[in-house]
Structure formats: C-alpha cells, structure tokens
Image: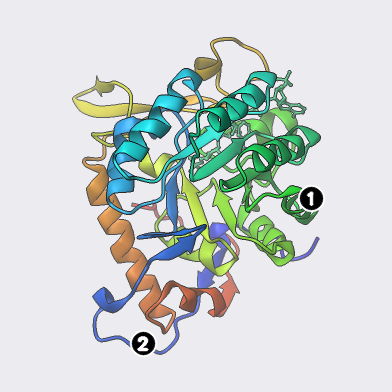
Amino acid sequence: MENVFDYEDIQLIPAKCIVNSRSECDTSVTFGKHTFKLPVVPANMQTIIDEKIAIYLAENNYFYIMHRFEPEKRSAFIKDMASRNLISSISVGVKEEEYSFVEELTKENLIPDYITIDIAHGHSNAVINMIKHIKKHLPETFVIAGNVGTPEAVRELEHAGADATKVGIGPGKVCITKIKTGFGTGGWQLAALRWCAKAATKPIIADGGIRTHGDIAKSVRFGAYMVMIGSLFAGHEESPGETIEKDGKLYKEYFGSASEFQKGEKKNVEGKKMIVEHKGSLQDTLVEMEQDLQSSISYAGGNKLEAIRTVDYVVVKNSIFNGDKVY
Ligand SMILES: NC(=O)C1=CN([C@@H]2O[C@H](COP(=O)(O)OP(=O)(O)OC[C@H]3O[C@@H](n4cnc5c(N)ncnc54)[C@H](OP(=O)(O)O)[C@@H]3O)[C@@H](O)[C@H]2O)C=CC1
Ligand SMILES: Nc1nc2c(ncn2[C@@H]2O[C@H](COP(=O)(O)O)[C@@H](O)[C@H]2O)c(=O)[nH]1
C-alpha cells in the first residue's frame, strides 16, 4: 500500500479566492433525502449525544445519529421526533433482539429516516445480514453501515444494500483497539479514507481522529460526505454526563462505547474513559466549525463545499504543527 499518511501529514494548497467574504461560502451537504448545514455529525456515543441534543441538532438543520445504548427508548424517540416533524436517526447493533426491534418498527409503522449499524468490525456477515433485514422491513430508511477500513468492505456493504458506509477502525481519541489488537486505521485514517472512497459508489462517513476543524476540510478532500466527530464535541455544557471540578478547573467525562465503563464488565474492552476540559456551549462550537469550513472553501477557490474535493495537496510528514500544541 503506497501513500500512507494521516491528517497531521497533509496541507491543502490554496487556490485563487472567488468570494468577497467568507460568509458567501456554503457549507451545506445533501446526505440521503435531506440537506444539512454542515458535513459533520456528532458521534453516536453516550457522552456525546442524548435526546435533547438530537432535538437541538435536528431543529437547527444539523445531521445527528442517536446512540444505541438505551435500546428501550428508541421507539418513543422516533415517535417524539415525528410528532415534532423532525428527522429521526437511530443506531442498532447486530444481536438477535435487534432483528425483532426492526420488525416491531415495521409493525408499528415507525419508519426512521436513518438507521446506523454501529459495530466495531463492520466487514462481517453479521452486518451484511442486518443491512438486508432493515432493507427488507424498512425499505425507505437510509442505512449507514460500519465501521470498515478497506475498499473490499465498502464494496461488500454497498452490495448488500447499505446507502452509506462509515470508515474508521481505531483512530478515535478514546479508542484502544489499535493497542489491544494491532489492527485498524489509527495513524493512517486519512489515507484509508482515500483508499475506501476510490472504491465507493455511495457516500462515505469518515469516523474518528478529527482533532482540529481543518481536519474536516481534509476529510472532504479525501472523499468524505459526512465526518463523525467524538472528542471535539465532548465536554460541552449540553453534553451528557457530570461536570467534574479538579484543581479549580471544570471537566466532563468522555468514554468509549467499548470501554469497561460503558459495558459494565471487563470483557472485550477496546475503549477507555477520559476527562476533557469544559468547552462552553455546543452552539458556539458548531458556529465556529461552520466559519472555519467557510474559510476552507474560500481557500479552495470556490463558494461551495464541492470546491474542496478537487484542491491540490502536499504531504508534509508530521510537520504541520512544528511541535506546537494544537490550541
Ligand atoms: N470505530 C472503532 O474503531 C470501534 C468502535 N467501537 C464501538 O464500540 C461499540 C461496541 O462495538 P461492538 O463490540 O462491535 O458491539 P457489540 O458489543 O454490540 O457486539 C456486536 C456483536 O458482534 C460481535 N463482535 C464484536 N466484535 C467482533 C469481532 N471483532 N469479531 C467477531 N465478532 C465480533 C459481538 O460478539 P462478542 O462480543 O462475543 O465477540 C456481538 O455479538 C460500538 O459502538 C462500536 O462503534 C468499538 C471498537 C472499535
Ligand atoms: N476503538 C474504539 N473506538 C471507539 C470507541 N467508542 C467510540 N469509538 C469510535 O471513536 C469515534 C470518535 O472518535 P474521536 O477521535 O472523534 O473522538 C466514534 O465515532 C467511534 O467510531 C471505543 O470504545 N473503542
């Protein structure tokens, strides 16, 4: 495999500006039947999203994916979102009870707009069978399947009926898959995204490893239609979980979906728990993300997100921050 690189190793090359103000640049993206303000989705993790945040995001035209760790709440959630005339977007696993859950949704005529199959190793028959099951019972629902890290996996999941695939095994901030198993796209996530995008005929979500807003533009350049982000969304006022005070500073917890803390047992643990600095309001971060992405579009020499997809780039091997801290 040639050209292995990650976010840190790449700089996009500016093209002649065609706008008079960054505010003229349009960051919106169409994903499935809907158009959203940003090509960004907060990770479907329990310390990143809850019902209240989902409503806020949907009301304000941002894409969201509800996590699957309170399975009994999902039907009521879909009903509630429908009663508010908002999109519904949920996650499922692949265990036996999830098959019955999908069938129940059909019986109750609860049709989610989006379902994400949220599994660590998505290149598997378990995921292929679940895609087929959802497409059989809920044919109108847009199915996102993952996670994967190879073109073969993207092709197989698309062939099974997935409407989008999610790329990223091991690059996450609270991930320890790379350490515990020796496998994954950690350290070369951006190159893996590029590799997968070349094979994809449907949209790809880049998942994990985003550390700066510029990484969103880089993901778009290398083939992402959506970018899933955990750690940058953790620690906000609205984020689920307790605020912790330590040495006079405020923090919030962020834990992996495969952490011992999430699982409640020490079995196949591939995630950890950490605390992150309290960041203020989610809305401020979303606005800053939009402004930064508008600026990226202007540097790409366009006024729409599409302009970023074709910009030139250079590989600067781990040197773009010159040893500086990111912020
Ligand atoms: N993006 C990433 O890099 C990663 C993300 N995660 C997140 O952690 C959460 C838990 O993930 P996951 O463990 O898949 O979900 P589950 O714990 O729900 O497991 C789903 C099913 O798949 C089986 N399974 C899980 N991993 C493997 C594997 N490597 N090979 C064969 N079978 C497997 C499990 O059986 P059994 O447990 O008996 O093996 C179980 O039956 C998810 O939210 C996922 O997104 C976890 C790791 C990596
Ligand atoms: N290996 C693990 N990966 C995990 C776990 N929980 C979540 N995730 C993945 O991380 C991203 C978020 O990454 P970030 O760099 O933006 O913080 C998330 O969307 C999942 O794909 C876990 O326990 N283990």
Q: Where on the picture, by quarter, is residue 85?
A: top left
The type of residue carrying mark 2 is Cys
Say which quarter of the image contains residue 155.
Answer: bottom right
Image coloring type:
rainbow
Q: Is the residue marked 2 within 8 Å of ligand 2, measured from its CB?
A: no
Name the secondary structure under disc 2: loop
Q: Looking at the image, which residue sits at the far top?
A: 265
Is residue 322 visible to us here?
no
Front residue of this view, candidates 26 and 278: 26
Q: Residues within 10 Å of mark 2 (few under 14, many from 20)?
A: some
Q: Is residue 140 visible?
A: yes
Foreground disc of the pair 1, 2: 1
Q: Residue 95, image x and y in percent?
A: 68, 22
Q: Quadrant of the N terminus?
A: bottom right
Report x, y in % for residue 130: 70, 35
Left or right? Give the position of 304 relative to 13.
Answer: left
Instruction: Report x, y in % for residue 186.
Output: 64, 45
Q: Is residue 69 above or below residue 80?
A: above
Q: Are marks 1 and 2 in contact (CB under 8 Å)?
A: no
- Rounded to the nearest whole Å, what is the CA distance between mark 1 and mark 2? 40 Å
Indicate left or right for 154 with 238 as reference. right
Q: Which mark is residue 238?
A: none
185 relative position to 31: left or right: right
Question: Where does label 1 land, which residue?
Answer: 156
Which residue is at the front of the view, 129 or 110? 110
Residue on which disc 2 sits: 17
Mark 1 or mark 2, earlier in chain: 2
Name which residue lies at 63% across and 53% down: 163
What type is the residue that disc 1 sits on?
A: Glu
Number of numbered discs on residues: 2
Secondary structure type for disc 1:
helix
- Counting other residues with Cα less than 10 Å from the Cα at mark 1, is it few (<14), some (14-19), or many (20 or more)? some
